[in-house]
Image: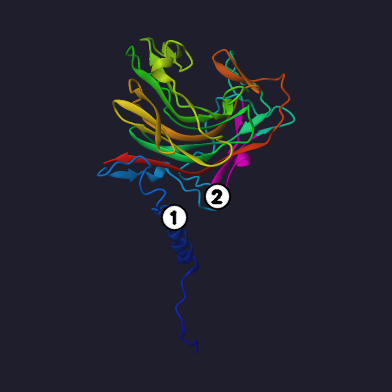
Amino acid sequence: MKKPSTGFRIPVLLLSVLFEWISIGALHAHTPKNARSLTAKPGENWVIKWNRSDDFNGRQVDWRKWLKKPEQFGAWTWDNDANVFVEDGALIITLRRGQAPTTPGTKNDKGGRQQSPYTSGMLKSYGAGTYGYYEARIKGTPLFPGASPAFWIYSRIDDSIVEAGKARYSEVDIVELTQRPAGPGNERISDHNLHAILSNGERGVKGRVWRRPHNPKFKEAQANEHRLPFDPRDDFHTYGCRVDRDVIVWYVDGVEVGRKKNDHWHRKMNVALSLGLRTPYARWENNRLVPNEAISGDGFPTSMKVDYVRVWELE
């Protein structure tokens, strides 16, 4: 006769589900560093949006909230399989140069793809939103000049919008680090800019009007240059931005470093963390960055680190 069990055994499937539930709970736990933003005022009720926030405390990137294969658009190729991983509670994004061109990078004038030897990584959230407070704690890459860690939000381009002056595309650069060319102190310049595509009334691509911050006509309304009191390559620092209906305000370590009127940045935007290529390894040509084939590329691979990224909305 079969003897009755003397103890309670939890089925393997149930154990697996329980372990996952505990792990997710730990990842989403409120801690002193993420319960409130650095700039929250007394009485404000900020709520974390976990579909665009991450502690990076797991064993790997949570690909349920981040795109594994984001769209290609630079003088390099996004390869998250090779260049994005989590280690010791931090996200690590690496920029590499190969011995030969990899899969195609940026589009050329004929609509094809230009070969590039560079690969990098980018986390782009599935979730999107507009107004709120965005914050990330980042340590820059050792390479300077040539690599730019970035924390930004951006929308898709909607060419179906034909009303003149309406935004087809919105982008808020919460911070771009070490993207300037070599020069005394240039490693300490951080950029906090705005980009937009407006409609000129025509349909399709012909109806796009780019508003870039480096254009002298839009610099006052869209560009913020800040000189940091530290070298961003040496340690982690916190970079934040509050996007409201009327104003956009940037912060470094909780201190305001710039503000602009919000004229065109009302579209739903995804969160992005990325490591981009800059001069001398890339150059601006035909309204886009392309790889500079004349430069061999020393200092690669190089990596940036992210302790956490946070998105709060005010309720």
Q: Residue at x 60, y 36 (%)?
A: 141
Spot occupied by residue 293 in the image (x, y as percentages of width and height): 70, 20
- Mark 2 neighbour density, 10 Å: few (under 14) some (14–19) many (20 or more): some
Assess whether residue 12 is covered by the magenta stretch: no
Magenta part of the chain: 76-95
Q: Secondary structure at mark 2?
A: loop
Assess whether residue 79 is covered by the magenta stretch: yes
Q: Residue at x 50, y 52 (%)?
A: 57
Disc sitting over residue 170 in the figure:
none
Spot occupied by residue 182 in the image (x, y as percentages of width and height): 63, 23
Spot occupied by residue 92 in the image (x, y as percentages of width and height): 58, 42
Q: Which residue is mark 2?
A: 60
* Residue at far bottom of view: 1
Residue type highlighted by circle 1 = Ile
Q: Would you say 75 lies left or right of 133 here?
A: right
Residue type highlighted by circle 2 = Gln
Q: CA distance from mark 1 to mark 2?
A: 13 Å
Can I make out residue 62 in this image? yes
